[in-house]
Amino acid sequence: MELGTVYATLGSKVDVVEMTPGLLPGADRDLVPPLQKRLEKLFTKIMLNTAVTALKDEITKVKVTFKLPDGKMEDKTYDKVLVSVGRKPNSKVPGLENTKVKVNERGFITVNKQLQTDDPSVYAVGDVAGDPMLAHKASHEGRTAIEHILGIR
Ligand SMILES: Cc1cc2nc3c(=O)[nH]c(=O)nc-3n(C[C@H](O)[C@H](O)[C@H](O)COP(=O)(O)OP(=O)(O)OC[C@H]3O[C@@H](n4cnc5c(N)ncnc54)[C@H](O)[C@@H]3O)c2cc1C
């Protein structure tokens, strides 16, 4: 959504596709209607209750197949597609298997409150160390880990 508004402001025609009935499913619902009102002017189209079921590379374009709210399928061709679902921790660090570091089923590295992994000489902070995957959480954890390494409580 954030990057879509950047491209639209710079002059690109942007369609937004969202599978659930409302934009920004993780956000406070009271905030969404006023934002949506503005976005409806900025974006070419906002498609709710619509799923992307296929993307096909057509060399210079991308063909996108949608499942519409009424169940019908529709194709539309775009210059570019920006996929913004499925953020996941990047915990596949080469050689991690040679340490005692544990990675849970969601791909997060297991840490204690001091951000120490199951291998006491290895710390993990930020996105890789668990939700919420946000910048201020990462920097706070970095500080906490460093303080622990330095023996500061
Ligand atoms: C589009 C977008 C918008 C966002 N907007 C916000 C926002 O408004 N507010 C907010 O709080 N958060 C936002 N975030 C989330 C925020 O960017 C992350 O939570 C934050 O960057 C996590 O910090 P990090 O240090 O854990 O990971 P990163 O910032 O991802 O840093 C990890 C670094 O490790 C490097 N790396 C990976 N593997 C290896 C390896 N094997 N060896 C060496 N280096 C490696 C990577 O290249 C990367 O530079 C946004 C994220 C995205 C994608």
Image (cartoon, rainbow, N blue to C red):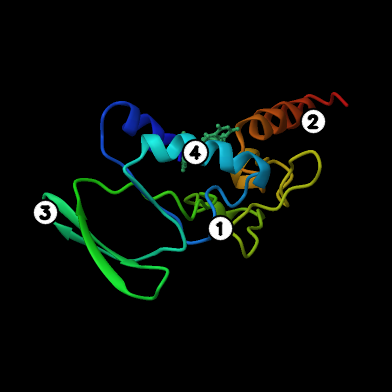
Taking depth in this image into account, of 37 and 24 the one nearest to the observer is 37
Q: Residue furthest left?
A: 59
Place of residue 116 in the rendered image (x, y in percent of width and height, measured from the top left): 74, 43
Taking depth in this image into account, of 37 and 131 the one nearest to the observer is 37
Q: CA distance from mark 3 to mark 1?
A: 39 Å
**Label disc, if present, on residue 59 of the rendered structure:** 3
Q: Is residue 88 left or right of residue 76?
A: right
Residue position for label 2 = 148
User: Helix, strand, or loop for circle 2?
Assistant: helix
Residue position for label 4 = 37
User: Helix, strand, or loop for circle 3?
Assistant: loop
Task: Pick whichever of labels 3 and 1 is earlier in the sequence.
Answer: 3
Task: Pick whichever of labels 4 and 3 is earlier in the sequence.
Answer: 4
Taking depth in this image into account, of 136 and 75 the one nearest to the observer is 75
Q: Residues within 10 Å of mark 3 (few under 14, many from 20)?
A: few
Q: Quadrant of residue 141?
A: top right
Taking depth in this image into account, of 92 and 24 the one nearest to the observer is 24
